[in-house]
Image (cartoon, rainbow, N blue to C red):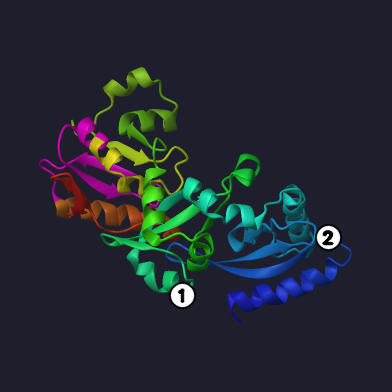
Amino acid sequence: MSKKEEMMERAEKLNRKLEGKNFRIKVRECFKNNGTKLGYILVSEETNASPTVYFESMKEYWDNDEKLLEFLEDIFEDNKNFSVNPDEICNREYILGRVKPKLISDSNIEEVETNKIVYKRYLDMLVLFCVEISELTDKNGNATFTLNREHLVKADISEDEVFENAVNNIGNDYQIRDMKKVICDMLDIPEEEKEYMTEDGIPMYVISNKQSINGASVILSDKVLKEVYEHINGDFVILPSSVHECIAVPAKNSSSDELRDMVREVNDNEVIPEERLTYSVYIYENNQLKIH
């Protein structure tokens, strides 16, 4: 029995126990970077904001019906008062004002086209477009939806328009942080002690958005790339540490083979599959980013 079949069978069993409750469980397949994830969507006539709970979040309760139902009921209760108007969040002004880019590997092209997701090719990556639902984000974390072709048709938006606005919306929503400061923050080391940390004299910067979610996409912005150039005082190499952030190091005296080996080792041992971006290394020179 496949995992999907197992989850569907389990949903039928759980729904029988939900008689008299305000929601029902349906299986949902959702495209994620480098694959498809399975989850339960909690649907109700009381609200149109139906939360999706992925299998990984349910693992510890999976072998116990009562604990699993309690877990799902808590999530439903936390979300049942949130509601959005589909007509409002799918109109032209709303989309263009809030859309942000997301970078994924172009190895996902088949899934992207199958799901009719809007995309643009960039080097060996794909740019997808996510719209933040601010009405939910303020109260319930980072809520977004990914644009598909139907969204653009209904909102009368061209692919060029959505790309231009997504990159423009990066605006000031980015951060370029000294690696030493990042390490100090992670280890709770006083920032004044960062000067005593060694990096073999090589400056390194972590580039992302302010939420550090899908933040690797800030490298689409010329403004960001030029600012990194100023920090490093010259051409630089981009190492994609995940879909959430990249690392910039000076291009001078850097070995592309060694850097690619480093990216491969980090991807294979430190980054979960759905957060991997690419195994490539990129170089910024002559005011242009390209594969190194």
**At x 35% / y 28%, what residue is drawn?**
181
Identify residue for label 2: 22
204 left or right of 171?
left
Residue 263, compared with residue 234, is above or below; it is below
Residue 247 shown in magenta: yes
Residue 56, compared with residue 242, is above or below; it is below
Question: Residue 177's mark?
Answer: none
Question: Badge 2: few (under 14), some or many (20 or more) residues near its Cα, within 10 Å?
Answer: some
Identify residue for label 1: 114
Residue 18, compared with residue 215, is above or below; it is below
97 left or right of 261?
right
Going by the numbered disc 1, the residue's amino acid type is: Thr
Please state the horizontal and vertical placement of residue 45, each as a whole percent of the image: 79, 62
Q: What stretch is highlighted in magenta?
A: 227-255
Depth check, mark 2 against mark 1: the one in front is 1
In this rendered view, identify the residue nearer to me: 122 or 32. 122
**At x 59% / y 74%, what residue is drawn?**
3
**At x 61% / y 82%, what residue is drawn?**
1
Please state the horizontal and vertical placement of residue 285, each as a whole percent of the image: 14, 45
SS for callout 1: helix
First-in-chain label (2 vs 1): 2
Residue 21 shown in magenta: no
Please state the horizontal and vertical placement of residue 93, each as a whole percent of the image: 52, 49
